[in-house]
Image (tube, rainbow, N blue to C red):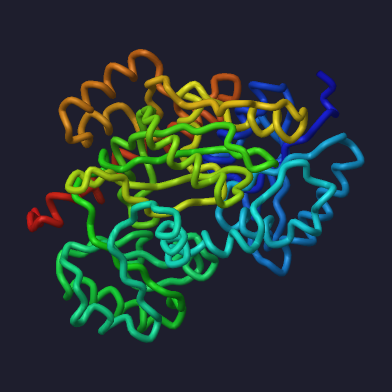
Amino acid sequence: MDTKEFLPIILGSDENAYGNARLFRRNYGVRPLLVCTRRLIATMDSKLFDLKCVDGFDSEDVFPNALLKILREKKKEYKKLVVVACSDYYAAMTSKYYDRFEGLIENKFISPELLGELDTKERFYTLCEKHGLDFPKTIIVDPDRREDALDGKDIEFPIVVKPDNSNSYDYLHCSFEGKKKVFFFSNIDEYKTMVKNMNASDNGYGGKLIVQEFIPGGDDAMRVMNCYSSNDGKVRLMCLGQPVLEEYSPKTLGNYAAIITRRDDALYAKMKKFLEDIGYVGFANFDMKYDRRRGKYMLFEINPRPGRSSFFVSAGGCDMMKELVDDAVFSIPREKPILGCKTALWSAVPKGTLKKYVSDPKLKSECMELWKNGVARTLFCCEDMSPRRAVRIYRYYLGYYKSFKRYYFDKEGKLDGDNS
């Protein structure tokens, strides 16, 4: 294959970016370009790609012109360019300024108008209601009503509290005592302590908060789905996963630590209809939880990008980057979407962590058996393990033992009153 046929440009330098770079190298032998503000551990000492750090690339004052300059330069060398955004911010900025990039990027991004309906949970739930999708009971809290927002409201504890958009620039760059990506509270006093700290900070969060009922169930009640829709708005790929363990450190609380790929044809059909009805294009990442009381999947959010843990999709027999290239570069049609159906395990944490912290005995046994058959791990690429990188990645990887020992708690047990 002509190596100048196309160039993948990946925005970001985290595990998500590294996993996508692996797929491009494996499938096409191309060397992607990663563009980011700074290099993170996941991409340090790697030989799989070229990397360009741009000061302030995560700032709207810098991003549009910086990306435009890179696209124009690379268009002189390559026939076609595809762009993969690995954070909500980069995805949002690419959508917002796509008209500047049109003609330089082969793959489409959702329109700014559709992004506006998806990028905050408040508007997303309005869209869910319109299309008959289920979501948790929710209260939207304005910044000036945080402390008394729940007074007299018909919501029972325990509750889950999070910013309207936890990946927004506003929340990522704020600081206050006890800051977390997601909060779990078993009583009103815990909630009020958090908002007092938030309000008292000189660099606090100025946006809305989302207060939701806690859907019963532990990490294994969660579900994650990654999809790719073609430039003409047709779903080409869907893969469902059951997280068996989440992360627990304050900055990454709620991120998936291990996932088993599953198949649910009824859910696939429902989400396919939703995506095509709203005219969605590109990557989509859904987070949801199975509510055993109602027998329904309750949607939390949709992210307009591959999920941080999206390498699990390749373990399930699917390949989102191949679908992107087949669609946007080679215009290969697909009459029916590829559906993830192979049962496999993806893990970001060591085997010992799964063995200790996966609470369901049946799931734990399944994890151990799947691990023996070959576990997918985003950062463990045999051909990219120089001694320097190997030391760095193994230190990072083994750090999960310390992190779980310090931060792990049984969500369902703690919120049901067991605070041991």
**Could you say where residue 221 lies in the image, as x and y percent from the top left?**
26, 41
- Residue 84 at what x, y percent from top left? 65, 43
Residue closest to the far right: 76
* Residue 403 seen anywhere in this rendered image of the structure: no
Q: Is residue 146 above or below residue 161?
A: below
245 on left or right of 51: left
Place of residue 150 in the rendered image (x, y in percent of width and height, measured from the top left): 23, 78
The residue positioned 40% from the left and 47% from the top of the image is: 287
Quadrant location of the N terminus in the rendered image: top right
- 278 vs 309, left or right, is right
- Residue visible at 76% across and 30% down? 331
- Which image quadrant is residue 33 in? top right
Residue at the (39%, 56%) spot, across then down: 251
Which of the 4 image quarters holds residue 60?
Answer: bottom right
**Left of 107 or right of it: where is 305?**
left
**Residue 221 visible in the current orientation:** yes
Say which residue appears at 78% left-offset and 45% top-offset: 105
Q: Is residue 366 above or below residue 61?
A: above
Q: Residue furthest top?
A: 373
**Horizontal and vertical percent position of residue 14:** 55, 44
